[in-house]
Image (cartoon, coloured by chain):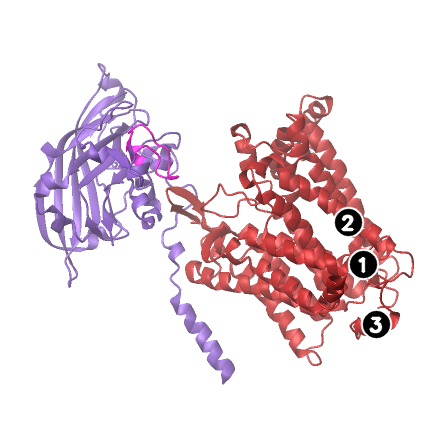
Chain colours: A purple, B red
């Protein structure tokens, strides 16, 4: 009887098994090659399955800034305070966009200081952790630091629920699969959807933020730009209440036009399109390095 | 002198404390190595007072040789270039602790306060408990047989880095479970599995408790390895089983012991000669390295294989300057890639840390250990079950560490170099080696452990009685 009880107890204890570590596995060297056409991240991680009962649309085009400042210069669109780090001792440091020292301590780079992994360890799990790690450009890591997007974009649940935040930012660049567009500009429309869970229900409220005609530097050899907007500008003064409870996001885009910095022999190279299924044209993708909701809090 | 007399009555207490120390160190509680170092050093200081006058002249000479070699190794390991600055004053503790644990093992056998099986079971239980706790947690996070189940999709991402799930498992590191390489934790499974060898000699009917304990410890180790499955670690059970079979079935046969003994010695000598040539080749720019490069077979042996591919940079690195040759690699940016290279061999890692002399002393120490283990098997009154388990543990530990030692075991903190001689498990194994220590310079018929200051009757009273008749074992 005693042995039976022990056996039953032992077996029951394995019902606690969560297999956390095996939730998200990939074949060897997944997403690890530089050829983006073979490595698009197309996942929507069940966010596309959730029940949206209310959708509110916002146009953030005139509040959205994109820049790639040179060493020592300010990031366009950010306040001075948001590009300054104040240490516990009160010392203030300018957060340099071009310093990309990964992770250890806070560094003095904007990316490694303001990244989501620094705010909460739960952002370190999974493939998309590369969007939260603070590496805002290739910087020798090549494909390992970015997520390569087609126009269908990607979606994901955040590991926790957003409580409050002030601004949204992402580090990105454009890239073509063909030559002839060195340091070109991609005029692109972005659509960011934030999903807020409606308490005591299975429903979600969606805030769809459109950012149209954004001039995205493309084929910049690993150099990315920071695109950002303040929630208060887009959502209004009630933005904290709206953000409280956001659990997921979707990002999609469409390429309007690609302007080459030189004359560009389009006949020779072709005109890139944002559709991965188009076999006639070369491809255009958004290389996303970082999703940032700096100085936010999560529960 | 009164103080020393009083201390002589403290054998049992100190032996008990040593066992406690070994158990806690074996469990690696908190990974707080410095605390283990200090406890070990303090205990061994007491121990020195207790046993310093209990060695005969020949025993003392033999002990000097044994401890002297370890002292030399510990000097190079503690103050080698690689870790000298990183650990600062702790290096003094490392130097003392390595010798202290070895000496505690030696003293434990002299005290005779505990039966040899008790000592083994204490160490084994600590290791098994650590494995059991880690194994259950790993099951909940990875499931069973995950190394096989996910072999086609083994990759996961953490903090933007790519990791292979089949090469890791959770392991209790102090008060937190951490993703740890199964190469580094596999050794626990192998060591515990050695307890199964003892079952050859223990009757399940007459000695139920001892049989059950050996079985439980052994099974925990074996189940841990199988439920991953850690195939490489399981392969290391083959030499263990080989040792067990030889000891069980060929013990006492004429020449068996000698063949095994000289076989091991021969392999050690061949490895050493091979290493000398490997070193000359890795140094480069000489006639031998050019000859190796031009010869297909030699090139494959010395350059184009997995092992030497990792070893050659280390050998080449230390040959860049006299300082690095004799005291190990400088912890500099120029050596960063070499330091990060996991050679999987603790002897080569010792070269990184302490240079060529550390390596030579380690080889000399290993050869001495072969003599000592032989002497232990011949002269010790321990039961066969104890001997076979101790033999299995020591052989598997050093063989495993020679071919599968992982100097970067913490998967998500891949920059953390773990020194072989500074790790708690090595300290416990050194204590076990100390326990096995049986002088090799004794005259024929001279008994180890016969205390000069005691009368023969008193010694007889203190010696545990064993059921087995050992005869003239050749092993």
A284 horizontally vs B130: left or right: left
Q: Where is residue A209 in the image (x, y as percent from the top left)?
A: 13, 41
Q: Is mark 3 on a helix, strand or loop?
A: helix
Tags 2 and 3 both on a single chain: yes
Q: Is residue B317 magenta?
A: no
Q: Distance between the residues labelled 1 and 2?
A: 18 Å
Quadrant of the image containing the C terminus of chain A: bottom left
Relative to B442, A137 lies left or right: left
Please report, as a chain letter, where disc 3 is located.
B
Which residues make up the magenta segment?
A93-111
Q: Can residue B264 be seen in this view?
A: no
Do discs 1 and 2 share a chain?
yes
**Chain letter belonging to callout 2:** B
B52 versus B287 height, above or below: below
Q: Is residue A94 magenta?
A: yes
Residue at left offset 72%, top offset 24%: B291
Q: Disc 2 or 3, which lies upstream in sequence?
A: 2
Most foreground residue, B419 or B383 = B419
The residue that label 2 is drawn on is B66
Task: Please provide percent x and percent y for residue B385.
Answer: 73, 68
Magenta region, mostly helix, strand or loop? loop
Circle 2 Cα neighbour tier, 10 Å, few/some/many (<14 / 14–19 / ≥20): many
Q: Which of marks 2 and 3 is in front?
A: 3
- Find disc 1 in the rendering and name its residue: B53
**Chain where mark 1 sits:** B
């Amino acid at each position: 009887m005693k042995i039976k009880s022990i056996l039953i107890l032992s077996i029951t204890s394995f019902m606690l098994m969560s297999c956390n570590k095996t939730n998200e596995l990939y074949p060897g060297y997944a997403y690890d090659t530089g050829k983006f056409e073979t490595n698009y991240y197309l996942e929507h991680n069940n966010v596309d399955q959730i029940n949206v009962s209310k959708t509110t649309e916002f146009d953030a085009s005139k509040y959205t800034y994109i820049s790639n400042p040179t060493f020592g210069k300010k990031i366009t669109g950010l306040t001075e305070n948001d590009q300054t780090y104040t240490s516990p001792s009160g010392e203030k440091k300018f957060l340099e966009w071009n310093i990309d020292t990964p992770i250890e301590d806070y560094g003095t780079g904007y990316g490694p200081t303001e990244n989501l992994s620094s705010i909460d360890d739960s952002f370190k799990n999974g493939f998309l952790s590369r969007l939260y790690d603070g590496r805002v450009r290739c910087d020798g890591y090549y494909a390992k630091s970015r997520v390569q997007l087609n126009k269908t974009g990607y979606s994901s649940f955040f590991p926790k629920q957003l409580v409050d935040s002030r601004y949204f930012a992402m580090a990105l660049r454009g890239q073509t699969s063909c030559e002839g567009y060195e340091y070109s500009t991609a005029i692109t429309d972005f659509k960011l959807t934030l999903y807020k869970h409606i308490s005591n229900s299975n429903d979600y409220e969606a805030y769809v933020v459109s950012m149209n005609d954004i001039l995205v530097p493309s084929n910049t050899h690993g150099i990315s730009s920071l695109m950002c907007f303040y929630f208060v500008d887009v959502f209004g003064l009630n933005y904290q209440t709206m953000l409280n409870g956001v659990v997921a996001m979707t990002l999609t885009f469409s390429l309007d036009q690609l302007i080459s910095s030189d004359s560009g022999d389009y006949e020779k190279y072709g005109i890139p399109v944002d559709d991965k299924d188009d076999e006639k044209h070369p491809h255009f993708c958004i290389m996303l390095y970082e999703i940032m909701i700096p100085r936010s809090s999560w529960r | 002198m009164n103080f020393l007399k009083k201390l002589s009555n403290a054998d049992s207490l100190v032996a008990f404390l040593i066992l406690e120390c070994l158990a806690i160190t074996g469990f690696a509680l908190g990974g707080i190595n410095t605390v283990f170092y200090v406890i070990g050093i303090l205990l061994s200081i007491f121990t020195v007072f207790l046993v310093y006058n209990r060695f005969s002249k020949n025993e003392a000479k033999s002990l000097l040789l044994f401890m002297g070699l370890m002292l030399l190794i510990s000097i190079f390991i503690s103050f080698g270039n690689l870790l000298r600055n990183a650990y600062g004053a702790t290096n003094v503790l490392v130097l003392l602790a390595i010798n202290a644990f070895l000496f505690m093992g030696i003293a434990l056998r002299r005290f005779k306060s505990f039966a040899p099986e008790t000592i083994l079971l204490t160490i084994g239980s600590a290791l098994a408990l650590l494995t059991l706790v880690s194994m259950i947690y790993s099951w909940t996070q990875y499931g069973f047989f995950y190394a096989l189940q996910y072999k086609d999709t083994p990759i996961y991402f953490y903090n933007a880095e790519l990791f292979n799930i089949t090469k890791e498992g959770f392991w209790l590191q102090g008060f937190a479970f951490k993703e740890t390489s199964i190469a580094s934790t596999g050794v626990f499974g192998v060591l515990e599995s050695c307890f199964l060898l003892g079952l050859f000699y223990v009757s399940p009917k007459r000695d139920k408790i001892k049989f059950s304990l050996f079985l439980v410890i052994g099974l925990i180790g074996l189940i841990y390895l199988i439920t991953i499955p850690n195939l490489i670690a399981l392969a290391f059970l083959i030499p263990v089983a080989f040792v067990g079979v030889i000891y069980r079935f060929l013990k006492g046969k004429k020449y068996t012991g000698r063949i095994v003994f000289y076989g091991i010695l021969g392999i050690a000598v061949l490895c050493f000669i091979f290493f000398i040539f490997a070193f000359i080749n890795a140094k480069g720019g000489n006639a031998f390295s050019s000859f190796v490069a031009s010869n297909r077979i030699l090139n494959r042996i010395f350059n184009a294989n997995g092992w030497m591919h990792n070893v050659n940079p280390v050998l080449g690195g230390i040959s860049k300057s006299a300082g690095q040759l004799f005291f190990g690699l400088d912890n500099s940016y120029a050596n960063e890639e070499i330091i990060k290279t996991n050679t999987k061999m603790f002897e080569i890692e010792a070269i990184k840390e302490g240079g060529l002399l550390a390596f030579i002393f380690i080889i000399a120490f290993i050869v001495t250990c072969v003599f000592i283990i032989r002497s232990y098997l011949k002269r010790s009154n321990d039961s066969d079950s104890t001997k076979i388990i101790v033999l299995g543990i020591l052989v598997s530990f050093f063989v495993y560490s020679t071919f599968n030692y992982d100097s970067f075991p913490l998967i998500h903190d891949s920059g953390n170099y773990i020194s072989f001689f500074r790790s708690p498990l090595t300290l416990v194994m050194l204590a076990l080696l100390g326990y096995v220590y049986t002088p090799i310079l004794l005259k024929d018929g001279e008994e180890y452990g016969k205390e000069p200051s005691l009368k023969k009757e008193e010694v007889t009273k203190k010696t545990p009685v064993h059921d087995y008749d050992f005869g003239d074992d050749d092993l």
